[in-house]
Amino acid sequence: MEKVYEAEVTTLAGRNGHAKSSDGLLDVDIRFPKEMGGAGDATNPEQLFAAAWSACFGTSLTIAAGIEKVKIGEVSVTAKIGVLHSNGNYDLGAHLLVKINDVDYDTAKKLVEATKSICSYSKATKGNINAIYEVVPN
């Protein structure tokens, strides 16, 4: 497989530190959220992951619509990434809410199902993260 792009980000001091990309476009402080005992005064890894996954899923959905030859309107994807704690272990959970304008609910569900096999984040997390994909009705 040919590498098309590679992001490079270095973090210092983990969840209470700083992240910077090699090209300087990402340059952010990272903090624990208040809900996890932190100051909550900066972004956190879960927010960054949610942004990345929702962006990828939205783009992949437009690709799926093209493959299926379905004309769609604006696509909105909200990703909720949760930190889960049980028996001393931490895991992630995901809930993606997908709204596709100008298509009926059944078509939207079909497109979301097709998109799961296109989106690189969905493929990478399959079987590793409990992910719920929900179609938001128009």
Image: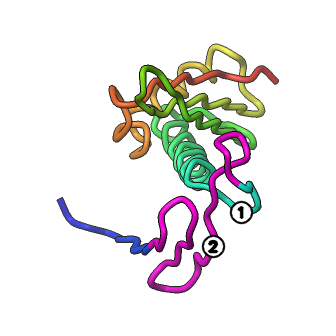
Q: Which residues are magenta?
A: 11-38
Count of numbered circles on the image: 2
Judge by depth and name the residue closer to the eye, 28 or 90: 90
Judge by depth and name the residue closer to the eye, 77 or 11: 11
Residue lying furthest top in this view? 106
Horizontally, residue 99 falls left or right of residue 79, namely right
Q: Residue at x 58, y 63 (%)?
A: 16
Q: Are marks 1 and 2 in contact (CB under 8 Å)?
A: yes
Measured Cα–Cα span from mark 1 to mark 2 = 8 Å
- Compared to 1, does 94 lie above or below? above
- Going by the numbered disc 1, the residue's amino acid type is Ala
Coordinates of residue 68 in the picture (x, y in percent): 49, 31
- Compared to 10, does 108 lie above or below? above
Residue lying furthest bottom in this view? 23
Coordinates of residue 21 in the picture (x, y in percent): 49, 78
| Quarter-of-image position of residue 125 | top left
| Quarter-of-image position of residue 98 | top right
| Quadrant for the C terminus in the image | top right
Q: Is residue 5 magenta?
A: no
Coordinates of residue 15 in the picture (x, y in percent): 54, 59
- Going by the numbered disc 2, the residue's amino acid type is Val
| Quadrant for the N terminus in the image | bottom left
Counting residues from the N terminus, which is met first, the one under dot 1 or under dot 2? Answer: 2
- Compared to 15, does 87 lie above or below? above
- Compared to 57, does 16 lie above or below? below
Q: Residue at x 47, y 21 (%)?
A: 86
Residue 42, numbered circle: 1
Q: Residue at x 75, y 43 (%)?
A: 74
Residue 28, numbered circle: 2
